[in-house]
Image: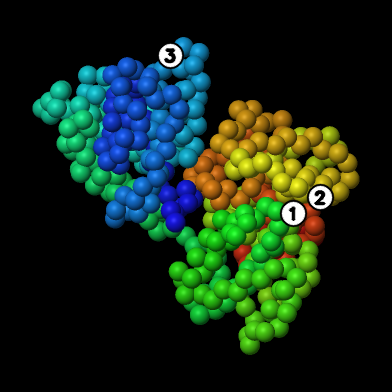
Amino acid sequence: MRAPKTFRLHIGIFGRRNAGKSSILNALTQQDVSIVSEIAGTTTDPVEKPMELLPLGPVLFIDTAGIDDEGVLGEKRIQKTLQIFDRTDLGVIVSNFNDWGEFEHQLIEEFKNREIPFIVVFNKSDIHGENIDIESQLDSVKIRYALTSATKSTGISGLRQLLLKTAPADFINRPTILADLVGPGEAAVLVVPIDKEAPKGRLILPQVQSIRDLLDNDSFCTVVKERELREALSLFNKPPKLVVTDSQAFLKVAADTPAQIPMTSFSILFARFQGDLNEMVKGAMSIDKLKTGDKVLIAEACSHHPIGEDIGTVKIPRWLTQYVGGKLQIDSIRGHDFPKNISDYKLIIHCGACMWNRREMLSRIIKAKQAGVPLTNYGLTIAYSLGIFERALQPFPAALNIYKEVYKD
C-alpha cells in the first residue's frame, strides 16, 4: 500500500512557461508523468506524482503551470499555481540562464516570506553552457542550485542529492501521532464506530495511521466499537495509558471511560499532528462568542460526497446551533480551494486534514490568524459543544492550561 499524502514531502516545481519544469519532473521520476512540448503553456493544471526518493522516503512532486502564463485562462492557471505554495514543503525553481529575472526573484521572495526551503535548477545547461557567473544570477551564494539538462538526463543525480540535502529537518524527524502519549510497552484503546462513513472492509485513514504509529513505537493497541469499550477496559490488568475515540462517539466514550484514564479523539490528535493544537484550542473557545446569525465556515479537506448524518454538514451545524441557541449562517467548502476573503466569518471549523501535509493546514491557520478569524477543528468543536472540552484536553497539559487560564475564575 502506498504511503498517504499526509506522510509525503511535498516538492513544488515552479518557473516560467517552457523552462523545462515538466522535463525535470519526468527525469526525476524516470517516467513520462507530465506532457512535454516546445509549445509554452503545455501544463495547464498542477500534476502530482508520488514516488520514493531514497534515502529520504515518500515524496509528492507537484508540477505547476508557468507563472508567466497569459490571457484569462492563464490567470486562472496562475491562481492554481499560487495555491500550491500553501502545501509545498520544499520548492524547486526551474529556469534557463538567459531567462533569469524578475519572475524568479518573486518566487524566491515568496519562498523566503513563507520560510519554505528551496533550490534553483538551471536547466538546459547543455545549450547555455556551464561557464556562467551563477552567483551573480542568484545574488547570493547561499542559494543552492543545480545544473541540469533534463532531455539528456545530465545533472539529475546531483539534483536528487540537493533535494535530500535541502529537505526540512522536521520532515525527516516526523513527530508521532499518539505514541508519545502512550509509551513503549503500554496500551491504548482506540474506539472505532463502524458507520456509513467508514469504507466497507476498511478503517478510515486517521485510525489506520494511529494504529501504525503505536506499533512503530512498540506500544500495544486494542481496537473496539463504542458499545464494547466498557467490557474491554474491564479486561485490562492495568489501565491503558490512553483512550482515543471517533469524535462522534465522544459522549458515550467519556461516560464509559474512568476519570483516571486520559481520553481524547482522533480529530484532536490530528489538530496537534497536522496543525497547531494550542491555536485551535483558542479557536474552539471562541464558540462562546457566537451569536444568532453569525457566519461560520466549515472546511473539509476531502471532496467525498456527504453520506447520511454527515459530520461536517449535518452533525456539527446541529450541535453548534443547540449550543448557541439560534441559527447560524454556515458555509461549507471542500478540497484545496479556500476563500480569498474570510474576514466576514466569526469562526472556521476544519476537518483533521488527514489527507494533507502539515504545511497546508498551517497555511490555513496563518491565513485565518492574519484575517483575525479564529480557527479550530471538528473534534475540538464537538468536545466544546458537548461540554467535555476539559476532559478531551486531559492528555495535552499545555493546551489544557490555555483553557484553564481563560476560565480559572
Q: Which amino acid does label 3 sit on?
A: Glu
Closer to the chain start, of discs 3 and 2, is 3
Upstream in sequence: badge 2 or badge 1: 2
Please, which residue is most extreme toward the top here? 71
Task: Compute the Cα span from label 3 to label 2.
Answer: 47 Å
Give neighbour class at mark 3: few <14, some 14-19, many 20+ (Cα, 10 Å).
some
> Residue 61's quadrant in the figure?
top left
Q: Do the residues labelled 2 and 1 touch (CB within 8 Å)?
A: yes
Residue 135's spot in the image, x, y percent? Answer: 20, 30
Residue at point 28%, 19% (across, down): 38
How far apart, in angstroms, are the residues tagged by discs 2 and 1?
Answer: 7 Å
Label 1: how many residues lie within 10 Å, few (<14), some (14-19) or many (20+)? many
Amino acid type assigned to the residue bearing label 2 in the image? Trp
Q: Mark 3 near mark 2, Cβ–Cβ under 8 Å?
A: no
Q: Name the residue under label 3.
A: 70
Query: In the rendered image, which residue does mark 2 sit on?
Result: 319
Mark 3 or mark 1, whichever is nearer to me? 3
Query: Residue at coordinates 49% horizontally, 44% vertically from top-left?
Result: 359
Q: Can residue 68 be seen in this view?
A: yes
